């Protein structure tokens, strides 16, 4: 048993015996909190706001004095089709939100993952409206066994529930583990991901519109590849939402 699994096991006991601390800042946790995170920490999550690319949602930094037209496309989206129709992120991957995501991914805080899912659902409530199905970016089965859950599935479940849409957690499968993406440029990442997803069995995709959910958007290569596989399997359109976006 890993140390974090051992700590998880002891938590119900500790909750009775000891006052709890906020998972992010360590401050004493008042009775009113969500997912083990204090209210000031939730309030400090920075949302992604301001002008962005119509397709991928990348913030537009060049337009500091003048808002770009709503039709604005970033260079990447002008150059080629992205597989997805539109992508938006709820927050920026920095500070307390980054801490919270790490707690979910590396310390097994699944309850916090569900709370972050509800935060994502509230932040981007309009995105699920036009989709028939909501699906997570999958984890490879080996990684899934190590972690015990797929953090993106905790998010997609909350998004589907909030929007009253069908949750399809097995719509995509991760058939080959991705080798480390560290140090790879966009083109290298794309090549590295090619052929690592396949459509899952069972759910008919023909003509359906899908909302694909992931935790972090970095270059968009992962959701692009996932969207491409869904489109090839018959999906009419794929939109994407992510909890956070890396700050460049
Ligand atoms: Zn806190
Ligand atoms: Zn773009």
Image (spheres, rainbow, N blue to C red):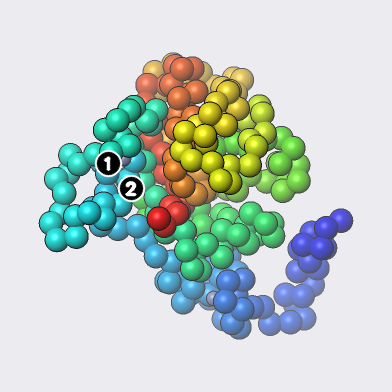
| Residue in the picture at 39% in, 50% down | 89
| Residue in the picture at 50% in, 44% down | 214
Q: How many marks?
A: 2
Label 1 Cα crowd, 10 Å radius (few <14 / some 14-19 / many 20+): some
| Residue in the picture at 66% in, 27% down | 175
Q: Is residue 108 left or right of residue 49?
A: right
Q: In which quadrant is the N terminus drawn?
A: bottom right
**Percent of width and height locating residue 50:** 25, 57
- Determine whether the beta carbon of the residue marked 1 sits less than 8 angstroms from the nearest atom of ligand 2: yes
Taking 240 as reference, is 13 above or below it? below
Between 2 and 65, the one lying in front of the other is 65
- Determine whether the beta carbon of the residue marked 2 sits less than 8 angstroms from the nearest atom of ligand 2: yes
Q: Which residue is under mark 2?
A: 58
Considering the numbered disc 1 on the image, is that residue within a helix, a strand or a loop? loop
Splitting the image into 4 quarters, where does residue 209 fall? top left
Considering the numbered disc 2 on the image, is that residue within a helix, a strand or a loop? loop
Q: Is residue 171 visible?
A: no
Q: Is residue 192 visible?
A: yes
The Cα–Cα distance between marks 2 and 1, rounded to whole angstroms, is 7 Å
| Residue in the picture at 41% in, 39% down | 240
Q: Are marks 2 and 1 in contact (CB under 8 Å)?
A: yes
Splitting the image into 4 quarters, where does residue 177 fall? top right
**Percent of width and height locating residue 195:** 58, 23
* Mark before the other along the chain sequence, 2 or 1: 2
Q: Give the quarter the ligand 1 occupies.
A: bottom right
Q: In which quadrant is the C terminus drawn?
A: bottom left
Label 2 Cα crowd, 10 Å radius (few <14 / some 14-19 / many 20+): many
Q: Which residue is under mark 1?
A: 74
Taking 216 as reference, is 206 above or below it? above
**Percent of width and height locating residue 59:** 30, 52
Taking 231 as reference, is 27 above or below it? below
């Amino acid at each position: 048993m890993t140390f974090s699994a051992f700590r998880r096991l002891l938590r119900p006991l500790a909750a009775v015996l000891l006052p709890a601390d906020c998972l992010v800042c360590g401050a004493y946790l008042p009775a009113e909190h969500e997912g083990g995170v204090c209210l000031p920490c939730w309030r400090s999550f920075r949302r992604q706001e301001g002008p962005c690319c119509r397709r991928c949602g990348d913030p537009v930094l060049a337009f500091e004095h003048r808002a770009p037209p709503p039709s604005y496309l970033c260079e990447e989206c002008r150059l080629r089709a992205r597989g997805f129709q539109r992508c938006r992120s709820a927050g920026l991957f920095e500070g307390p939100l980054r801490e919270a995501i790490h707690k979910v991914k590396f310390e097994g805080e699944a309850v916090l993952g569900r709370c972050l899912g509800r935060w994502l659902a509230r932040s981007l409530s309009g995105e699920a409206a036009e989709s028939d199905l909501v699906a997570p970016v999958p984890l490879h089965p080996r990684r899934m066994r190590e972690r015990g859950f797929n953090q993106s599935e905790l998010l997609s479940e909350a998004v589907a529930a909030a929007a009253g849409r069908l949750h399809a957690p097995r719509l995509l499968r991760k058939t080959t583990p991705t080798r480390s993406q560290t140090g790879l440029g966009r083109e290298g990442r794309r090549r590295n991901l090619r052929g690592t997803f396949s459509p899952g069995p069972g759910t008919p995709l023909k003509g359906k519109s899908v909302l694909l959910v992931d935790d972090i958007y970095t270059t968009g290569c992962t959701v692009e590849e996932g969207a491409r596989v869904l489109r090839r399997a018959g999906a009419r359109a794929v939109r994407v939402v992510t909890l956070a976006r890396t700050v460049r």
